[in-house]
Image (cartoon, grey):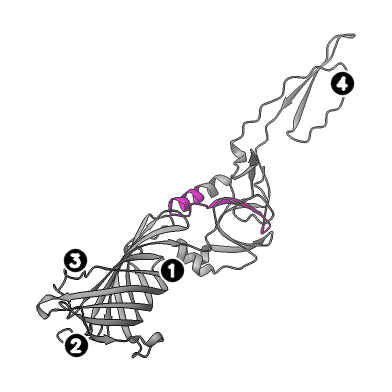
C-alpha cells in the first residue's frame, strides 16, 4: 500500500521540470496497492494498481488541463545492493531498479484558463476502456529503497516514470511526442508466509528440540550438556555393608575394615565419566517445513551454501535441512556460529544416530 505525488510532464506544463502551485496547481496525488513475489535475493516480480490525478498549466497559451486515471502494471525489481554485496536475511535496507509495462485508463478536460470553459474532452464516454475512458499502453522505469522494520514489515520509497504511447493525455498534441507522468510514493508492505522465530512446544515444532518452561511461556533453547559441572554427593556412613548398584554415574567402593565390634564405614567415591556415545554425529539445522519438501537449490541460493553440502531428512512429519557432519558437539557449535555470523540467525546444533535425528542432544 502506497501514496504520494502524481506529476505530469508534457505540452500543457508551465515549466519543464518543476511544478507550479499557483494559477491552477500542478501538484496532484495518487495511491496504489501491489502484490510482490520475491523470486531470489536479486529478482522480484509484482503487479500494481494505482488511482491518481494529473494537471498542468500553460499560462502563455491561456489553458490548463485536469485528468484522472486508473493504472495497472506488471514490473520486475532488481536489487542493486544484493548484486554488489552479499545478501543477508536481516539486512536493514536495500535499493532496487524497477522496470515494466502496463496500461492507463484516463479522462481529461482541457480548460480555458480565463473563462474556465472546457475546450476539449478526452475519454468521458468516447474511449475504449471501462466507462468510456481512453486506454493507452505505458512503459515504467524507476528506482526504489526498502527499509526493514521487522521480519514482516517494511517501508518503501519509490519514484517511477510512466512513458505513454500517446501525446493526448493533456488534450493537446504538439511538441511532446510521448507524454510522461511520475509517481513518487512512500508505502508500507507486509510479508506473508514468514514464520516467527519462537513457537509453542509441540510435536509440530520444527526449529528446535529443547524447551525450557517459565511462567507458562515457552522459550526455545539449545542446551549444552558438556558445560555442566556435576557435584559429588557427600560421604555416606552405614552400619551394614551392602552391595551398592549405581547406574549413573559409576561408583567405586572402598571398604575400610576396623577392629571387631567397631563400626565399618563405606566411602562412596563418585567417578565422573567422559561423555562417550557410539554412532552419534552432530549437524547444524538451517531450515524445516512441516509436511512439505523444500527446494535444496532455493535454500542453497538463499543462504549461499553449496547444494551438495545440504542434507534432507524427515523428522516428526517435518522435512529438515542440515549441513555438516561432526563427531563432537564443539565442532558443530563452531560451524553453527559461522552460519549465524553469515546471516542464518536461527541455525542450531542437532544430533543424529544411524541417520535419524534425535529429539535432544545426547548426554
The region drawn magenta spans: 334-357
When asked about the image quadrant of residue 71, the answer is: bottom left
Q: Which mark is residue 21?
A: 3
**Is residue 159 visible in this depiction of the protein?**
no
When asked about the image quadrant of residue 82, the answer is: bottom left
Mark 1 surroundings within 10 Å by alpha-carbon count, few (fewer than 14), some (14 through 19), many (20 or more)? few
Asked whether disc 4 touches disc 3, contact meaning CB atoms under 8 Å apart, the reply is no
> Residue visible at 19% across and 79% down?
10
| Dot in front, 2 or 3 | 3
Comparing 297 with 52, the one in front is 52
| Dot in front, 1 or 2 | 2
Instruction: First in sequence, mark 2 or 3: give its number.
Output: 3
The residue indicated by pointer 2 is 173
Instruction: First in sequence, mark 1 or 3: give its number.
Output: 3
Mark 1–mark 2 Cα distance, whole angstroms, equals 43 Å
| Dot in front, 4 or 1 | 1
> Residue visible at 40% across and 74% down?
49
Asked whether disc 4 touches disc 1, contact meaning CB atoms under 8 Å apart, the reply is no
Mark 2–mark 3 Cα distance, whole angstroms, equals 24 Å
Residue 260 is inside the magenta segment: no
- The quarter in which the N terminus is drawn is bottom left
Instruction: First in sequence, mark 2 or 4: give its number.
Output: 2
Mark 2 surroundings within 10 Å by alpha-carbon count, few (fewer than 14), some (14 through 19), many (20 or more)? some
The residue indicated by pointer 4 is 241
Mark 2–mark 4 Cα distance, whole angstroms, equals 113 Å
Amino acid at each position: 500500500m502506497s501514496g504520494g505525488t502524481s506529476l505530469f510532464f508534457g505540452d500543457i506544463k508551465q515549466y519543464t521540470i518543476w511544478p507550479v502551485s499557483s494559477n491552477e496547481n500542478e501538484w496532484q496525488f495518487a495511491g496504489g496497492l501491489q502484490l510482490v513475489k520475491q523470486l531470489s535475493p536479486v529478482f522480484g516480480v509484482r503487479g500494481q494498481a494505482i488511482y491518481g490525478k494529473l494537471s498542468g498549466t500553460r499560462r502563455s497559451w491561456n489553458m490548463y488541463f485536469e485528468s484522472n486515471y486508473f493504472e495497472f502494471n506488471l514490473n520486475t525489481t532488481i536489487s542493486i545492493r544484493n548484486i554488489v554485496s552479499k545478501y543477508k536475511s536481516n539486512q536493514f535496507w536495500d535499493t532496487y531498479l524497477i522496470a515494466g509495462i502496463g496500461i492507463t485508463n484516463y479522462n481529461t478536460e482541457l480548460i480555458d484558463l480565463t473563462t474556465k470553459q472546457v475546450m476539449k474532452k478526452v475519454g468521458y464516454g468516447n474511449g475504449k476502456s471501462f466507462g468510456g475512458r481512453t486506454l493507452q499502453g505505458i512503459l515504467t522505469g524507476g528506482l526504489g529503497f526498502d527499509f526493514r522494520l521487522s521480519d514482516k514489515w517494511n517501508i518503501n520509497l519509490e519514484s517511477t516514470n510512466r512513458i505513454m504511447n500517446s501525446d493526448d493525455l493533456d488534450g493537446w498534441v504538439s511538441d511532446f511526442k510521448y507524454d510522461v507522468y511520475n509517481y513518487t510514493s512512500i508505502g508500507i508492505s507486509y510479508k506473508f508466509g514468514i514464520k516467527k522465530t519462537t513457537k509453542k512446544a509441540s510435536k509440530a515444532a520444527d526449529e528446535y528440540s529443547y524447551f525450557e518452561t517459565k511462567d507458562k511461556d515457552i522459550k526455545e533453547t539449545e542446551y549444552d550438556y558438556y558445560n555442566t559441572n556435576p557435584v559429588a554427593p557427600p560421604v555416606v556412613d552405614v552400619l551394614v555393608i551392602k552391595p551398592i548398584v549405581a547406574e549413573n554415574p559409576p561408583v567405586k567402593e572402598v571398604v575400610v575394615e576396623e577392629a571387631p565390634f567397631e563400626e565399618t564405614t563405606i566411602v562412596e567415591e563418585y567417578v565422573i565419566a567422559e561423555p562417550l556415545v557410539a554412532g552419534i554425529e552432530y549437524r547444524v539445522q538451517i531450515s524445516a517445513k512441516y509436511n512439505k519438501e523444500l527446494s535444496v537449490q532455493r535454500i542453497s541460493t538463499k543462504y549461499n551454501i553449496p547444494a551438495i553440502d545440504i542434507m534432507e531428512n524427515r523428522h516428526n512429519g517435518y522435512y529438515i535441512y542440515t549441513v555438516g557432519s561432526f563427531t563432537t558437539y564443539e565442532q558443530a557449535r563452531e560451524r553453527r556460529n559461522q552460519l549465524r555470523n553469515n546471516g542464518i540467525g536461527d541455525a542450531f546444533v542437532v544430533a543424529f544416530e544411524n541417520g535419524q535425528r534425535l529429539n535432544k542432544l545426547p548426554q
